[in-house]
Image: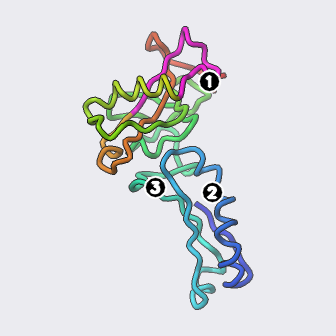
Amino acid sequence: MAFVPASSAEEARELGPARCEERTREVRGRPAGVRGVAVVPADDGFETARRRTACLVLGAHGPVYGPLGRHREPGSVFADTATMQRRDCLDVHSAREVRLVSCAGRYDAQVLGFTRLASGVTLAEAPGAADRACAREVPPRDYGFAPSPHEAGSRTAAGAWKSGSYLAVCTVRRRNGGTMEGNGP
C-alpha cells in the first residue's frame, strides 16, 4: 500500500513499523478483517530496497482478493466481499455480480460496516442471518438513514465460510428496491 523512507537500516527497523501503521491507518479502517504488516529490509538489503520499508495490508483471516483503497476502479466487480469497504456504493447486478460505483450517482446499496456470524450458521443460512444481524448490530439509523425508506441489508460470500471468519458485510438499501443517490446522510 505504501513505502516509507529511512536514512539507515537501523532507522527502518526502529521507525518503519510505526510509520507504516500511520500510512495504512485509513485503508485498514475501511475493510473488515485486515491487518498491517511492515516489511523492514535487512542491513544487507537496505540499499536494494531503495532505503524503504514496504507497508502491506493483508487479510487477517485469509487472502484479500483485489485492490484496496484508492487502487480500486469504479465499475469494477468485487471478487470477494472481503474487499468491500465502509461507505462503498454498490451496483448489484446479481447475487454474484456486485460492482463498485461512485456514490455521487445512483446505486443500489451502501456499505455501512461488518459483523461476524456464528460458526454454526451455514453458507445457505447466511443471507437471512446476516440481514438480521446487520439490522441489529449495524442499523442504518445509526448512520443517519431514516428507517421508513431504508432497511439493513447484507452481502455474504463463500470465502468467509472457507476461511472460518463468517464475515458479513452490512449495507443500507431502499425498502422499495429502488436506487439510492448521493453520499447519504
Bounds of the magenta span? 138-155
Q: CA distance from mark 1 to mark 2?
A: 26 Å
Query: Of 126 and 109, which appears nearest the observer?
Result: 126
Q: What residue is pinned by disc 2?
A: 24
Which residue is depicted at the point 64% across and 69% down?
A: 17
The image shows residue 101 at horizontal and vertical percentages of 52, 33
Left or right of 84? Residue 9 is right
The image shows residue 145 at horizontal and vertical percentages of 60, 18
Q: What residue is pinned by disc 3?
A: 60
Cβ atoms under marks 2 and 3 closer than 8 Å: no
Q: What residue is pinned by disc 1?
A: 142
Residue furthest bottom as drawn: 44
Query: Of 12 and 47, which appears nearest the observer?
Result: 12
Q: Amino acid at mark 2?
A: Thr
Secondary structure of residue under mark 3: loop
Secondary structure of residue under mark 2: helix
Eyeballing the image, is 38 above or below 171? below
